[in-house]
Amino acid sequence: MRGGREIWTILTDTGQQALGLVSEARALGEEAGLRCCVVLVTADEVGELAALVGAGCQKLVHLEAEGREIVFYRPIAGTLASLAREREPRVILLLSSLFGRAVAPRLAAELQTGVTADCTALSMSREGQLRQIRPTFAGCFNAAVICRRTPAIASVRPGVFTARLYPKCALSVETVKLQGQPDVFTLVQKVGEGADTIGLARASVIFAGGLGLGSRQNYEELCRFAFLTGATPAASRGAVAAGWAPYSAQVGQTGAVVRPRLYVAFGISGSVQHLSGMSGAERIVAVNTDSRAPIFSISDAAMVADCNRVIEAGIQKFSREGLS
Ligand code: FAD
């Protein structure tokens, strides 16, 4: 494929993270003279389009898919590949959600091109190629990747881009039907909570707990404190690996990327992998017994204290007085 005049964003919803990616695609498209096209894969009617247009979408293709479950990933990727062969987008972007992680490699295989997973930054080179940045070696380095084939396919960590506001424009909308049969898999049962971290990434106040909490019971107390104050509980990978918190609560390189207004870290050391998921917070408060803990280097407020005592005091105060 030669690589034509479009940059695609393949989405399954039009939430804030999706809109952030559309805005990034539009900005990249403007740099390289590419039209920003959204391919929306959904079984539902396409509803309100103003948000998509505002985020920068210039063309919409609605792929009417019966479902987004594992049984449909192959036909979805197949249909997207046929479309891409016909229209030759130069770049295809997806979110690193369950859907994006399942579809991006299948699509790349169909189109015999490369995919860079879990990017945290994107730009266009002078030659008009997509420059993809992704953390590597446990977040110690960033790799810059350029795909020599087109389309370049990248999945992007949810939450790294925020939506911008573009002027209104007339949007062309086209509907395409899903081709092919469900995959060879049969969905038998869904087990546990979803591994997607979309909800967490939207939270505006987060209380996150780490191994410094000392026990699962103390993590539950942190959750109680969070619920009392309207915050969303989260965890370090240490706390998730200890079995105190579900994976969907994990913040960091292999969890969610969050950008809340306030992030309070209780008993979290501040490893590079954790920081890569939360350093974009507007305000960071850390509670740690070790005054040299790395988390303090990026905190706006530091409390050298036992986090469990702080949580306990907080629960007492808010249960007595409520939010005022
Ligand atoms: P620790 O590093 O053990 O820190 C505990 C902290 O609690 C210490 O600073 C200690 O001083 C403090 N403390 C102890 N007692 C108390 C107390 N009573 N009150 C207050 N403070 C106290 N980590 C993530 O978080 N997210 C990721 O997505 C992630 N991805 C990774 C990917 C890879 C490839 C690798 C190799 C690692 C990844 N990690 C990730 C793990 C990361 O390197 C750390 O091991 C992990 O973040 C540590 O979790 P923690 O801060 O809870 O625990």
Image (cartoon, grey):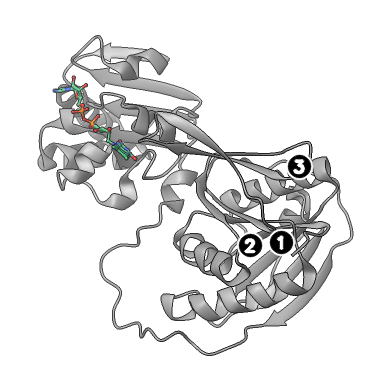
Residue 69: x, y in percent?
44, 75
Q: Secondary structure at mark 1?
A: strand
Element class at badge 3:
helix
Mark 2, residue position: 10
The Cα atoms of the two marked residues, 1 and 2, are separated by 6 Å
- Residue 98 image offset from top left, x and y in percent: 44, 62
Mark positioned earlier in the residue sequence (1 or 3): 3
Numbered-mark total: 3
Tell me the element at label 2.
strand
- Residue located 63% across and 78% down the image: 79
Name the one closer to the observer, 12 or 207. Answer: 12
Residues 176 and 210: in front is 176
**Residue at numbered disc 1:** 38
Q: Amino acid at mark 3?
A: Ala
Query: Which image quarter: residue 309?
Result: top left
Q: Is 142 in front, or is 23?
A: 142
Reading the image, the residue beneath label 3 is 27
